[in-house]
Image (cartoon, rainbow, N blue to C red):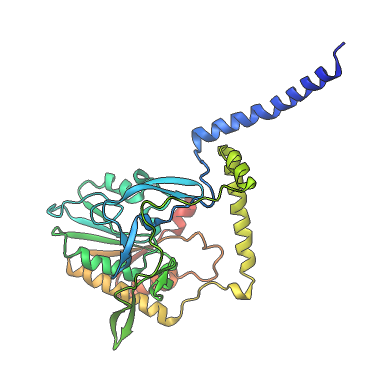
């Protein structure tokens, strides 16, 4: 007859094995098909290591900078070219027709490995073109206009297309002299002309030194336990999805909060954006190219009451600019 301690030990071992084995299978599966390591909630490495103050643009990429960028749930290796763009090195003497991409985080490839950036995937499919990625995180159409003005003086080849990836945030960015907690230039319409204001952009902000270590509060026992637990890919994935659901519910509740109304563009804001797009189109046309605008579906589309796709699409039609809404294609995918 078995002793009670041995009986309870075997029973506990059986229960533990019953729980542990399925967990190990799930954990192995996550590590194979869905690598999703935990890098901490306070470990986010600000992109100032890849950006620098720019008196014209507000900020621009540091030429030749390379290294890891950390987000709450990912780690991406990034590398700037000699002009400060997250792009390949280009031979300005190359006579291949050029396709230029303008945009913000989506085009820059935030949280995306270099080989998975859609601009790079497209480059592999179109070897007959020289494809430029002139984007940067948080850039608005006004900064994209300034970038294009500078680029056109450097590339000698034929300009085929300029593809501008437009988001809902662009209207607000064009109408503000600060975005992402950084100062930026701003165009105004004076005497029916676009006039650049706010330049030189003041060097106000915290541009962290490259050697400054990434801060992370690991002193509390809760932080230590969380770090140990989230060495598990599957536990971290579950926690991240919990935060996602929590954020969605919080955003829905904020829609009904009178003090948390989403940004609503005025008629003047839309006119300013229209004039900026018109000037970009003029520059592209002068080089013999064509401007195409693609509307990127925002992650906030289901939460924000006003989307500017219809308004901007009409403005593009009035200006003779070809435009496409990617929303339906994203929904199918």
**Viewer-proximal residue among 47 and 11:** 47
**Relative to residue 214, is residue 129 drawn left or right?**
left
* Residue 290 location, quadrant: bottom left
Looking at the image, residue 242 lies above or below residue 320: above
Q: In which quarter of the view is residue 308 placed?
A: bottom left
Instruction: From the top left corner, tell me how far across and down residue 53 is, in percent.
Output: 32, 65
Residue 97 vs 259, above or below: the answer is above
The residue sitting at 42% across, 60% down in the picture is 296
Whole-percent x, y for residue 78 in the image: 35, 48
**How many discs mark residues in the rendered view?**
0
Q: Where, by quadrant of the figure, is residue 252 drawn?
A: bottom right
On screen, residue 122 versus residue 26, left or right, reads left
Where residue 224 sits: x, y (%)? 60, 43
> Can the viewer see residue 221 in this picture?
yes
> Who is closer to the viewer here, 326 or 190?
190
Q: Where is residue 80 in the image (x, y as percent from the top left)?
A: 29, 51
């Amino acid at each position: 007859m078995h002793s009670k301690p041995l009986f309870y030990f075997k029973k506990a071992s059986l229960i533990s094995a019953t729980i542990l084995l399925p967990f190990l299978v799930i954990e192995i599966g996550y590590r194979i098909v869905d690598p999703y390591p935990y890098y901490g909630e306070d470990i986010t490495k600000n992109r100032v290591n890849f950006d620098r103050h720019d008196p014209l643009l507000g900020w621009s990429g540091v030429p030749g900078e390379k290294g890891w960028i950390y987000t709450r749930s990912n780690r991406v290796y990034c590398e700037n070219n000699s002009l400060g763009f997250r792009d390949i090195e280009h031979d300005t003497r190359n006579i291949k027709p050029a396709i230029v991409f303008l945009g913000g985080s989506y085009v820059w490839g935030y949280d995306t490995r270099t080989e998975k950036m859609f601009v790079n995937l497209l480059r592999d499919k179109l070897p007959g073109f020289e494809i430029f990625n002139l984007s940067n995180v948080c850039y608005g159409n006004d900064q994209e206009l300034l970038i294009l003005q500078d680029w056109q003086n450097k590339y000698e080849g034929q300009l085929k297309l300029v593809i501008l990836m437009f988001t809902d945030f662009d209207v607000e960015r064009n109408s503000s002299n600060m975005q992402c907690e950084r100062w930026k230039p701003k165009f105004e319409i004076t005497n029916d002309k676009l006039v650049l204001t706010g330049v030189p952009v003041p060097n106000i902000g915290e541009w962290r030194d490259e050697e400054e270590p990434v801060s992370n509060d690991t002193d509390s026992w809760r932080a230590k336990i969380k770090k140990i637990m989230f060495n598990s890919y599957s536990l971290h994935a579950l926690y991240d999805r919990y935060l996602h659901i929590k954020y969605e519910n919080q955003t829905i509740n904020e829609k009904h909060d009178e003090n948390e109304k989403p940004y609503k563009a005025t008629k003047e804001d839309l006119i300013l954006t229209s004039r900026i797009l018109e000037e970009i189109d003029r520059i592209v046309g002068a080089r013999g190219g064509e401007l195409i605008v693609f509307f990127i579906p925002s992650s906030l589309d289901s939460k924000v009451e006003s989307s500017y796709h219809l308004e901007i699409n009409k403005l593009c039609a009035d200006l003779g600019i070809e435009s496409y809404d990617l929303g339906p294609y994203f929904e199918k995918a």
